[in-house]
Amino acid sequence: MPYNCLESINSIYVEKKADGYVTKPCCLFKQRGPNVEDINELLDNDYINEIREGFKGDWKRPECEECIIKESVGKKTSKRQQSLARGDKGILVWDLRPGNTCNLKCAMCNPFNSSKWYEDLDVYSKYLWPGMNKQLKRARESLDWDWVYERCKDKAEKIYIAGGEPFYMKSVHNFLDKLSKHKWNCDYTIIEIQTNGVSNTDAFLKILKKFKRLRFIISIDGWGSVNELIRYPTQHDIFCQSTQQLVDLNPKSSSFNITVQAMNLPNVDKVVAKLRKKWSGCTTDIHKLYHPNFLSVNCLKPHVVQRVLEYTRVQGLKEFYKDYKFDEEGNATMIKYLLDLDSKRGTNSKKTIPWCFE
């Protein structure tokens, strides 16, 4: 029986915690298996093998919601569809998560994915993880870069790197510098970097220019002050300037990523329109926020959500929230959380995102 998804066969997800490497068939799969100590086990372990066999049957499982929604609205670029196009030719795509070093502390993020959040541990631990100071050993650790390099040189079809913030990581800089010495990789490997758009360095850009197939996925969750509040301490002018540098390297292959949540739902149509006008050659993709629960769209009051879904022209947004159900407790927690962040950071959520307080 043929596989209905090849993501767990021709790609590999590499993320290291203190207690081992994470096992997931892909980054969008909403479940993970037990961590493994030996990085070689990522290629062959009971959990991944079971997932692979499962994809010989019906692939539409709850963990695959992102691909289900994308394909239901007619998009041809879901991870599942891309994996089938690659075929069963061994590991071709590398999804690397090298650490949590970052220069932003986005409101919906956490200390495990952003080192900048260490500055606000008191706020985070109050709502999400009591005793956080003692648990930071669970944050991401550096990968076995030599292992990855040996398997990527002269053969990787695509290398995707996310953080933290890759531009802010010396290990990523060194890895790509080493890989850039291989003409095959410079000519044929797609280097795709997820970035916050405010961390460019001339030294890093100089290395990246050696790769002919370069892509950037730039995270943005609002326009202007909304993005500055959510992706604190982003500055809009610096974001636009740095993003232009990235887009100029490959104008038709960069894209923007929006994480839809309570803090930006009424702003999504505006940011999509602004992006299309300013960088018309780039695509825009939306994803649904799942954690923390008290920042999900379900925490906005019904009249706010209904108002947005009536006028939105963003493909997929209505499908995301067709099962919307108001979370009254989450709404109360969200308001307290935003006010605590305001007190800590000197921001003004009531003014910038008033729909959260309606």
Image: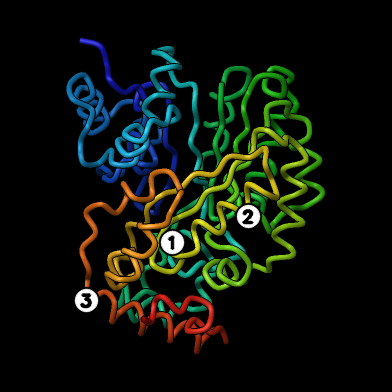
Mark 2, residue position: 274
Within 10 Å of the Cα at label 2, are there few (<14), some (14-19), or many (20+) other Cα atoms? some
Q: Mark 1 or 3 closer to N-term?
A: 1
Across and down, in percent, residue 281 comes to 67, 37
Disc 1 crowd, CA 10 A, few/some/many (<14, 14-19, 20+): many
Query: Which is more foreground, mark 1 or mark 3?
Result: 3
| Residue type, label 1 | Phe
Residue that numbered label 3 is attached to: 328
Q: Residue at x 74, y 54 (%)?
A: 242
Q: Residue furthest front?
A: 311
Check disc 3 and report its element: helix, strand or loop: helix
Identify the residue at horizontal 76%, vertical 38% (top origin). Answer: 249
Mark 1–mark 3 Cα distance, whole angstroms, equals: 28 Å
Picture quadrant of residue 304: bottom left
Q: Residue at x 61, y 72 (%)?
A: 225
Disc nearer the start of the sequence (3/2): 2
Marks 1 and 2: in contact by CB < 8 Å?
Answer: no
Disc 3: CA contacts within 10 A as few (<14), some (14-19) or many (>=20): some
Q: Where is 333 relative to 266, above or below?
A: below
